[in-house]
Every structure is written in C-alpha cells, then in structure tokens.
Amino acid sequence: MSSGESKMSIPLYESVKKRFKRNRSEAEIVLSTVHIFSKLSRGEIRQIEKVMHIRQYLLSEVIVKQGAPGSGMYIIVSGRVGIYILNHEHQERVITELERGDFFGEIALLDDSPRTATAKAEEPCTILGFYRPDLLGLLETKPQIGIKILIALSEVLATRLRMTNEDLSKVQRQLQKIEGLHQNEGE
C-alpha cells in the first residue's frame, strides 16, 4: 500500500466514526464515561438510558438537600453543580464543584439514609437521575446489567473509602504533631 492509499483510507474511517457518534444520544455518551456504567456495552447503556430520568435545573436550584432522604444518584450531562455541607455554624460551605460526566449521590443506590450534602446548580444544568428502584428493577429483569453496575459502584465506593482513610490518617498525623508542640511548650 502506498502512502497515498493510506491517507485516503483515514478520511473514510473518520467519516464513519463521526457518523457512528452522531447516532449516539447525549445521555449515552455521558453515561459511557461514568465509571459505574463504563463496563456496560453500548446496548446495555441504551437499556440504562430507558430507565433514566432527565431534568433541567435553573441557576441556584437545589438538586438534593443535606439531611433529606436519599433516593438515587445524579449524573451531570451539562452545566456545573456545587456540593455544599453545613458547617458547625449552619452556614453552607462548598466542598467541590462537579461538571459534565461527574456524578453524585451514588450511596443512595444502596440505602435511603439522609443526604450528607446539598447539591445546587451553579449554572443551568441537565441532570440524569438513576434511582434505587431503577437499580432494583434492573437486578430483577436484567440481572447481568444490575450486577455489573453494583460491582462498579462497589469499586467507586471502595476507592472513595480508601481516599477518606488516607485523608483521616494525614489529619491524625498533623494533630499528633500539634499536640507534640503543645506538650513541648508546656515543659
């Protein structure tokens, strides 16, 4: 094959690739980037998309409120979401900002404990909701898909737990250093 033939086949490939991507929905594209759904085939993602709930949020609109019962997770299709917690003075403090492809509230897929933070639209947003009854329904009707989601969810939660443990260890070491300084000053 000459270099001229090689160059001719690349534009054809790119054209097919672009056409293929055009047939995918925005939700499907975003879902395929979310770790919890990343191990699913394109057909399985389309099955998930059927049970997803899509909603638009306005600037500053609350998506979930700290202390409210959890019902499911949320995936950002467009826009930015701020995650806030109440400090000891009951003032909201932003802990992170999330954007397209990020998700939050995934613990609610496992239990209905109260939300640990408030999520608020930092700009107009399109959000997909995936709720606990949706997951339970999938486990009954499409167990292979449901199990793949649960395994990926477990991986996400295990990673976050490890990170939290590392952060806690760092804080404990810093506290021990501070306590040591105070003891040395008192001697």
Image (spheres, rainbow, N blue to C red):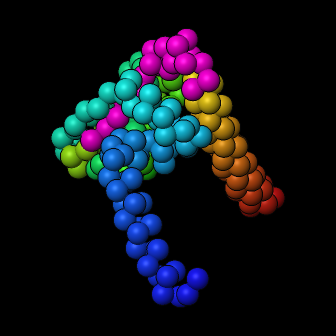
Q: Where is residue 130 drawn, in percent x and y?
A: 42, 27
- In magenta stretch: residue 142: yes
Looking at the rendered image, the quarter that the C terminus falls into is: bottom right
> Residue drawn 33% across and 47% down?
23
Q: Where is residue 170 drawn, in percent x and y?
A: 70, 53
> Residue drawn 44% across and 29% down?
48
> Residue drawn 32% across and 27% down?
53
Q: Is residue 149 or residue 46 the one in the foreground?
A: 46
Above or below: residue 173 compared with residue 133: below
Q: Is residue 64 or residue 22 the one in the foreground?
A: 22
Residue 182 shows in this picture? no
- Residue most extreme to the front: 1
Q: Which residues are magenta?
A: 126-145
Q: Is residue 124 or residue 25 the one in the foreground?
A: 25
Does 157 sit left or right of 12 as displayed? Answer: right
- Residue most extreme to the top: 140
Q: Where is residue 108 drawn, in percent x and y?
A: 49, 24
- In magenta stretch: residue 174: no
- Overall secondary structure of the magenta stretch? helix
Above or below: residue 107 compared with residue 177: above
Above or below: residue 51 compared with residue 56: above
Does 173 sit left or right of 5 as displayed? Answer: right
Residue 58, by quadrant, is top left
> Residue drawn 41% across and 69% down?
12
- Residue most extreme to the left: 58
